[in-house]
Image (cartoon, helix red, strand yellow):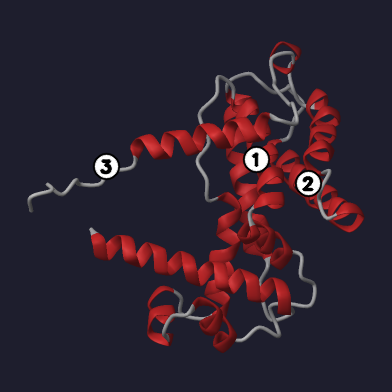
């Protein structure tokens, strides 16, 4: 168990180092040597977890979605929650910021950036499909087109927020996005119950932290006479 936990920590350290170097230098200019120096790990440790610089980039991409939020009574509320939490994490988590920056790095000509968008679109397509099955969406809604539209809209909103104020107003901008977007796809009875408030993300993340702390194994107490 200790070895597994150490491997998880090492992988995380490498990802955080790669994200920082990608963010500072851009994917094309970043080198494995710089990532090793930043992470403070051996080349063997890095290649145990990631076979190439591109695999590191994919690992950074995956951090966009690497969080499990509390289930809600409607799938559309879960869709809203994922967007609000993404906005909050973009402001507070360097690894998530680097993930989005890497996905939008037009200078990374030798990196396939489509997985970053495909993973997000696929997740939204699944949630929207389940929402439609449960009768939460208006009949005319095309699930695949709506998923792509939401991802594209969010990407543009966060880029505008970054350029104008370093994403300081991103959560409010995402609220406005949902306020315009949801009425065009949601049945009125469900729409009336959706919580799209700007502080919802922080409440959800606090709940996630509390649940993680409760689920964490208690450290063994060594008897004082041992």
Name the residue rendered at 39%, 79% in the picture: 45
Look at the numbered discs 3 and 1 and tell me whether their residues touch, using CB distance below 8 Å. no
Residue at which label 3 appears = 218
> Which sits in the foreground, 55 or 137?
55
Look at the numbered discs 2 and 1 and tell me whether their residues touch, using CB distance below 8 Å. no
First in sequence, mark 2 or 1: give its number: 1
> Which sits in the foreground, 110 or 154?
154
Cα separation between marks 2 and 1: 12 Å
x%, y% of residue 96?
64, 57
Residue at which label 1 appears = 85
Cα separation between marks 3 and 1: 28 Å
Looking at the image, the residue that sits furthest to the left is: 225
Using a 10 Å C-alpha cutoff, classify the residue at mark 2 as few (fewer than 14 neighbours), some (14 to 19) or many (20 or more): many
Query: Of helix, strand and loop, which one carries label 3?
Result: loop
- Looking at the image, residue 6 sits to the left or right of residue 108; the answer is left
Residue 154 tag number: 2
First in sequence, mark 3 or 2: give its number: 2
Looking at the image, the residue that sits furthest to the top is: 189
Name the residue rendered at 50%, 41% in the picture: 68
Establish if 29 lies above or below 202: below
Residue 75 tag number: none
Say whether residue 177 is visible. Answer: yes
**Quarter of the figure with the N terminus:** bottom left
Cα separation between marks 3 and 2: 40 Å
Name the residue rendered at 88%, 53% in the picture: 165
x%, y% of residue 145?
75, 42
């Amino acid at each position: 168990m200790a070895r597994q936990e150490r491997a998880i920590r090492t992988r995380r350290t490498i990802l955080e180092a790669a994200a920082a170097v990608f963010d500072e230098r851009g994917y094309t200019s970043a080198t494995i040597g710089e990532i090793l120096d930043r992470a403070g790990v051996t080349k063997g440790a890095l290649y145990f977890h990631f076979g190439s610089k591109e695999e590191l980039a994919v690992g950074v991409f995956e951090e966009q979605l690497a969080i499990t939020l509390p289930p809600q009574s409607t799938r559309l509320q879960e869709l809203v929650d994922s967007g609000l939490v993404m906005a909050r994490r973009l402001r507070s988590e360097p690894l998530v910021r680097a993930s989005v920056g890497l996905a939008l790095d037009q200078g990374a000509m030798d990196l396939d950036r489509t997985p970053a968008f495909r993973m997000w679109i696929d997740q939204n397509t699944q949630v929207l499909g389940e929402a439609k099955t449960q009768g939460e969406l208006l009949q005319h809604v095309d699930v695949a087109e709506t998923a792509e539209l939401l991802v594209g809209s969010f990407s543009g909103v966060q880029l505008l927020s970054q350029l104008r104020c370093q994403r300081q107003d991103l959560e409010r901008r995402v609220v406005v996005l949902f306020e315009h977007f949801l009425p065009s796809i949601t049945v009125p009875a469900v729409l009336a119950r959706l919580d799209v408030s700007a502080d919802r993300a922080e409440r959800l993340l606090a709940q996630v932290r509390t649940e993680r702390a409760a689920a964490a194994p208690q450290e063994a107490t060594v008897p004082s006479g041992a």
